[in-house]
Image: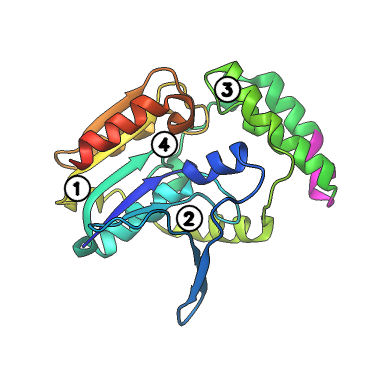
Amino acid sequence: MHTLRLLVITCCLGATLIHAADEHPGQTFKTDAVTLYYETLGSAPGTPLVVANGGPGFDHSWGGYLVMAYAARYPQHIRRLLIVDSGAPKLSDTIFLFKDVFPEGVAREDAAEFASQMGDKAARIKSLREYFSMLFYSPEKRDVALAKLTDVDENVAVNEAITHDLERFDLNPELPKYSFPAIVMTGRYDINVAAAVAYRIHKAIPGSQFAVFDQSGHLPFYEEPAKFLQTVESFLK
């Protein structure tokens, strides 16, 4: 059986922000329809911990939605499920707080968006830096992360296509069927996915745990790593 751990924007966005180069080059394998990329860290025996990254076309929060869908389709493959700052089970129900909390940041982001849509990569990076700057609770950790963000690999066409397709799906009826242990984790000050979304996911999954990181935004594993690791280890034990 496999553990499916979902770090929504998760560790992959953290890696984008924190590491200038990929320190763990991965491998690929082909299915009938697609080629999948993966990285393996560690070689200890036992149940593997699978981390689903964000996206689509980008390291962002839909990884949570992906693993909730996988858990609904293949519950026999799940031993324990961790959901971290995930988008809503019906993606369009996700609560964004950017305009309410950072109106000036959104204005600057919008100002760069036209040139970005016209293919200006510098404008795109400027727009994304504005977006990233709104994901943190700690200004100090935000500045350290942004200082290391020099480039962003993004596929806008993939993002738009999959986001549009996801409008067909609603996972809300599936969550009450989960019968494996689950924990739903969120940063208290997550502007990208309001904590209320995580709480609703928690209430929908029978017997699930709920963990809040009070000094984190969208990236609790980066802003509160010790508490995050302690929470994860306690749940997996």
| Label annotation for residue 85 | 4
What amino acid is found at the position of numbered circle 3 in the picture? Lys
Residue at figure coordinates x 74%, y 40% from the top left: 150
Q: Nearer the viewer, residue 68 or 53?
A: 53
Q: Are marks 4 and 1 in contact (CB under 8 Å)?
A: no
Quarter occupied by residue 101 = top right
Q: Where residue 131 sits in the image (x, y, percent)?
A: 65, 33
Q: Where residue 195 sits in the image (x, y, percent)?
A: 39, 27
Q: Are marks 1 and 3 in contact (CB under 8 Å)?
A: no
Horizontal side of 199 relative to 124 (left or right) equals left
Q: Where residue 40 sits in the image (x, y, percent)?
A: 43, 59
Q: Which residue is mark 2?
A: 167
Which numbered mark, 4 or 1, is in the foreground of this view? 4
Mark 1 and mark 3: Cα distance apart in space? 37 Å
Horizontal side of 139 relative to 227 (left or right) equals right
Residue stretch rendered in magenta on the structure: 112-119
Q: Earlier in the sequence, mark 2 or mark 1?
A: 2
What amino acid is found at the position of numbered circle 4 in the picture? Asp
Q: Which residue is mark 3?
A: 141
Would you say residue 170 is visible in this rendering?
Answer: no
Mark 2 and mark 1: Cα distance apart in space? 21 Å
Which numbered mark, 3 or 2, is in the foreground of this view? 3
Q: Earlier in the sequence, mark 1 or mark 3?
A: 3
Q: Which residue is mark 1?
A: 176
Q: Earlier in the sequence, mark 4 or mark 1?
A: 4
Would you place residue 206 above or below residue 47 in this image? above
Instruction: State the quadrant of the N terminus.
Output: bottom left
